[in-house]
Image (tube, helix red, strand yellow):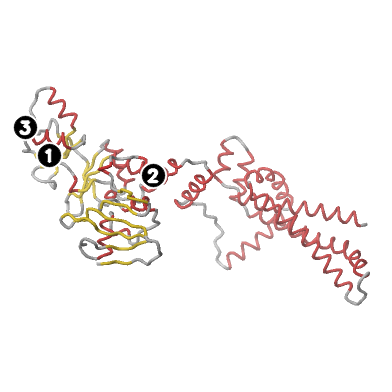
Amino acid sequence: MDLLQNLFLILILILISSFFSISEIALAGARKIKLQLLSEAGDERADKILHLQNHSADFFATSQIGLNAVAILGGSVGEGALRPYFATFIGQFYQGQWIDNIAFFASFVVVTLLFILYADLIPKRIAMINPERAALFVINPILVIIKAVKPLAWAINAIANLTFRIFKINTVREDNITFDDISAIMDAGAEAGVLQQQEHHFIENVFELEERTVPSSMTARDDVVFFTLDESEESIRQKIADYPYSKFLVCNEHIDQVIGYVDTKDILVRLLNNQSLVQLNESVIRNLLIIPDTLTLSELLDKFRASNDKIAVVINEYALVVGLITLSDIMTTVMGDWVVPEAEDQQIIKRDENSWFIDGLTPIDDVKHALEINEFSDWEHYETLAGFIMYRLRKIPRLADFVEHEGYKFEVVDIDNYKIDQVLVTKLNNDLTDREWI
């Protein structure tokens, strides 16, 4: 065979090898989610790819047979075709006993580089750009080749499976999608402009409902406004006027003796009908949901849906009321920064680029979002910023006590009867390790 015939044969072998390289990357890297969408759109090739991914042993055996056979044949043909020409060319400059070895090495390097570039590297990079599209292109030819070499592939797989058993290697592929996977996809979508900023924010907060507990979003015990059974009509009218709430708890004598709640709509109806509010009775008091403080927001949503309630009292293990939570509180958690409260109700107030005033009862998850802090250590021991500071100080804090965490200084600037009311958060210029100052 002359040189042109040999080069043409090498070209054919490179194309065959590149086909197997593209197939290997494309069929292994094609994402199941996209393939399922293509399948639902009616593309039968997507079904074939999904089936092949679930039964990939025959494909990989076929791919390796093709790649290795072509590589060996290409090396043999290339070395035999190019070595005489390299020997003649080198002979013009060097005459010695090593001329055949040098010609062999030169032909080996050239053929190897050709196969690395055009039969392996470039095809695989092309397949990685859009693996689903490449997989759709190669699936039908690959299935034909798999059938053609099935006996040999079966023998190779039998030996491979025996090897796996000997070394106790698990060959079952796990395709479980975790929250981290979904979060990474959302981040990529936001960076690419597929997801708008508020959409990304909402989705992220929805997933957090499974991790955030009820105390992180509830109205704390000290801030709950309630009526007692013997409360005067004047006091009831005054509380309704002073507080912009549509629902109020009704208790026997104190907050830990909860009976139910009243809706201001019902009170309005009584007033319009010229009925007295001197005594709260069964006609206006409604039953309400009582839940433990260990529930997650996701679990609470399920309870709201099942009971058709929109308000719940949160109690601890000692049956003491620790707070009140409504469906609106959960929705506010999901909406996050896109719900803009009145200035006086804000728990996080930004003073300048490097400092914030934060209410001590602010949920720690809200602090994380506002300050862009990845994690608070031992977060399972507290729910609020005040709880974090007390946990780190290991004592009831005093004014000017502070801790440093993740490049931020958290300083207590206001205390109300041992309760941390306000915290000044300052961003530090230098990276310091976490410290506590008492």
How crowded is the residue under tag 1: few (<14 C-alpha within 10 Å), some, or many (20+)?
many
Task: Give the residue displayed 87% in from the left and 62% down from the top.
Answer: 82
> In front: 202, or 166?
202
Q: Is residue 402 left or right of residue 372?
A: left
Q: Residue at x 18, y 37 (%)?
A: 243
Tell me the kind of residue under disc 2: Val
Q: Is residue 373 left or right of residue 138?
A: left
Residue 206: which disc? 2
- Cα–Cα span, label 2 and label 3: 43 Å
Count residues near mark 2 (Cα–Cα under 10 Å), then give few for <14, some for 14-19, many for 20+. some
Residue 278: which numbered mark, if any? 3
Q: Quadrant of residue 158?
A: bottom right
Residue at disc 3, secondary structure: loop
Query: Split into 4 quadrants, where in the image is the C terminus?
Result: bottom left
x, y percent for residue 311: 24, 39
Residue closest to the eye, 91 or 282: 91
Image position of 190 with respect to 405: above or below: above
Q: Quick one: which residue is furthest to the top in this view?
A: 273
Is 141 displayed left or right of 387 in the figure?
right
Residue under pointer 1? 227
Q: Quadrant of the N terminus?
A: bottom right
Tell me which amino acid carries mark 1.
Phe
Looking at the image, tell me whether mark 1 or mark 3 is earlier in sequence order.
Answer: 1
Q: Disc 1 or 2, which lies upstream in sequence?
A: 2
Q: Position of residue 178 (x, y in %)?
A: 46, 52
